[in-house]
Image: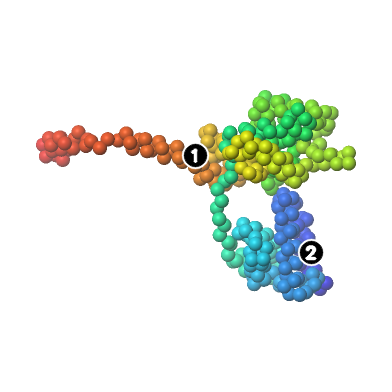
C-alpha cells in the first residue's frame, strides 16, 4: 500500500469510528449506511479501474468517477432517486471531513458538491385509517405470551409514534409508568432524546406485559426481546416485519381498509395523521414526532385529503347559500345618489 492509499484508508477509519459516532453523535443506522456506501464505491472503483484495493487513493474520488458510480446505481442497480441521493450525500460528507485536515482535497470536495441531486418523486404519506388501525391492533391473541408481546409492541409504537429503531432500543428503564404523567423515553436520530406521554390503556397493557416478561428484571434489560438458545436478544427488524405481516393479513380479511403490507413507519404516520385530524397543531406535532423543524411535519397537512375534502364541501355549502339577488342598494336609485354624493 502506498502513502496516498494509506492516507485515504486512515481517513475512512477515523470518519466511521470517531467522527460520526463520537463527534457528530450520529446513530448506528446512519453510520452503517455510510459504511455501505463507501464500501460499494471502493468496489466500483476497483472493478472499473481494474486495480487492487490497496492502490485506490483520494484521486479516485473525482467528480468523473462519482458520476460514473451514480449512473451505475441508477442503471445497473436500479436504485431509486432517493437511494442515489443518499449515496451522493455520504460521499460528499466524507470528502468534506477529509479536507479539514488535508486542504489539498478541497477541489475534490467542491467538485463532489457540484454534482446535481436527482429529482425525487414525492410519494403520498401512507397511513391507516383509525378503523383499520383499530382492527389491526386487536389481531394478536393476548391470552398467549407471544401474542401479548406483539400486541404491546404495536400499541406502544402507535401510541408514541415511535420509529422502529426507537422501539427496538427501548429498555425497561425507558418506561415511567407510576408517575402522575406516565411517559416513555425515546432515543431518536442523532442521539436526540424525547419523552412522550402514554395513554392510560397503553400503561395498563405495559404493566401487564412487565409482570409477565420482566418480573424481577433490572432496568438495563431490553423491553422487547426474543429468546435464542436460552438467551435473551434484542428484537430485530426482521422479527417485527414477520409479525406485522401476519397480523396485517388477518386484519385485511376483516377490514378492506387495511393495506396488503403494513410497515412499522406506517404506525408512525398513522398516529401523526390521527392526532392532526383531531386538532393537534403542526408545531406541537413536530415536537411529539421528534422533528427538528416543523417543515418535516407539514407533509401531514399536505397529505390529509379528508380534511381538504371537508373544507371544500364547507366552501361549497356557503356558496350554495348565496343568492343571486342584487343587494338592496343596487336597486335603490336614491341610495346610489347619496353614496356617490349626488344627493
Q: Which residue occupies the foreground of this view, 180 or 171?
A: 171
Residue 326 screen position, x and y as percent: 21, 37
Please give the name of the residue rendered at 52% of the width and 44% of the height, measured from the top-left corner: 303
Q: Which residue occupies the foreground of this view, 343 or 273?
A: 273
Tag of residue 10 = 2
- Seen as rendered, the residue at the extreme front is 253
- Seen as rendered, the residue at the extreme left is 343
Q: Which residue occupies the foreground of this view, 195 or 254?
A: 254
Q: Is residue 214 left or right of residue 196?
A: right
Please identify the quadrant where the C terminus is shown. Answer: top left
Residue 337 screen position, x and y as percent: 13, 38
Asked if residue 283 is positioned above or below residue 77 in the image, the reply reads above
Asked if residue 42 is positioned above or below residue 23 in the image, the reply reads below
Please give the name of the residue rendered at 71% of the width and 40% of the height, measured from the top-left corner: 246
Q: Is residue 73 left or right of residue 284?
A: right
Please give the name of the residue rendered at 58% of the width and 61% of the height, measured from the top-left corner: 118
Residue 76 screen position, x and y as percent: 67, 66
Q: Which residue is labeled 1 in the image?
A: 306
At mark 1, the secondary structure is helix
- Seen as rendered, the residue at the extreme right is 229
Residue 275 screen position, x and y as percent: 56, 35
Asked if residue 234 is positioned above or below residue 22 in the image, the reply reads above
Q: Is residue 308 left or right of residue 30?
A: left
The mark that comes first in sequence, 1 or 2, is 2
Amino acid at each position: 500500500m502506498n502513502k496516498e492509499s494509506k492516507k485515504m484508508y486512515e481517513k475512512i477509519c477515523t470518519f466511521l469510528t470517531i467522527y460520526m459516532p463520537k463527534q457528530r453523535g450520529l446513530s448506528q443506522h446512519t453510520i452503517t449506511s455510510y459504511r455501505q456506501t463507501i464500501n460499494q464505491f471502493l468496489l466500483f472503483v476497483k472493478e472499473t479501474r481494474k486495480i487492487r484495493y490497496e492502490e485506490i487513493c483520494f484521486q479516485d474520488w473525482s467528480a468523473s468517477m462519482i458520476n460514473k458510480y451514480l449512473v451505475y446505481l441508477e442503471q445497473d442497480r436500479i436504485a431509486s432517486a432517493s437511494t442515489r441521493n443518499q449515496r451522493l450525500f455520504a460521499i460528499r460528507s466524507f470528502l468534506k471531513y477529509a479536507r479539514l485536515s488535508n486542504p489539498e482535497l478541497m477541489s475534490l470536495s467542491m467538485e463532489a458538491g457540484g454534482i446535481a441531486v436527482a429529482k425525487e418523486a414525492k410519494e403520498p404519506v401512507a397511513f391507516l385509517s383509525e378503523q383499520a388501525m383499530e382492527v389491526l391492533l386487536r389481531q394478536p391473541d393476548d391470552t398467549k405470551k407471544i401474542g401479548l408481546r406483539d400486541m404491546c409492541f404495536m400499541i406502544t409504537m402507535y401510541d408514541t409514534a415511535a420509529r422502529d429503531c426507537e422501539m427496538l432500543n427501548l429498555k425497561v428503564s425507558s418506561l415511567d409508568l407510576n408517575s402522575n404523567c406516565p411517559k416513555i423515553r425515546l432515543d431518536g436520530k442523532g442521539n436526540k432524546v424525547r419523552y412522550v406521554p402514554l395513554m392510560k390503556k397503553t400503561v395498563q397493557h405495559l404493566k401487564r406485559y412487565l409482570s409477565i416478561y420482566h418480573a424481577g428484571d433490572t432496568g438495563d434489560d431490553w423491553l422487547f426481546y426474543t429468546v435464542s438458545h436460552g438467551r435473551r436478544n434484542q428484537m430485530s427488524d426482521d422479527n417485527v416485519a414477520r409479525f406485522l405481516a401476519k397480523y396485517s393479513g388477518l386484519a385485511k380479511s376483516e377490514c378492506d381498509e387495511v393495506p396488503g403490507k403494513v410497515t412499522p413507519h406506517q404506525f408512525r404516520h398513522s398516529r401523526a395523521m390521527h392526532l392532526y385530524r383531531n386538532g393537534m397543531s403542526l408545531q406541537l406535532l413536530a415536537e411529539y414526532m421528534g422533528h427538528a423543524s416543523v417543515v418535516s411535519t407539514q407533509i401531514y397537512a399536505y397529505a390529509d385529503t379528508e380534511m381538504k375534502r371537508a373544507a371544500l364541501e364547507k366552501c361549497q355549502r356557503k356558496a350554495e347559500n348565496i343568492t343571486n339577488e342584487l343587494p338592496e342598494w343596487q336597486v335603490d336609485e336614491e341610495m346610489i345618489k347619496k353614496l356617490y354624493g349626488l344627493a
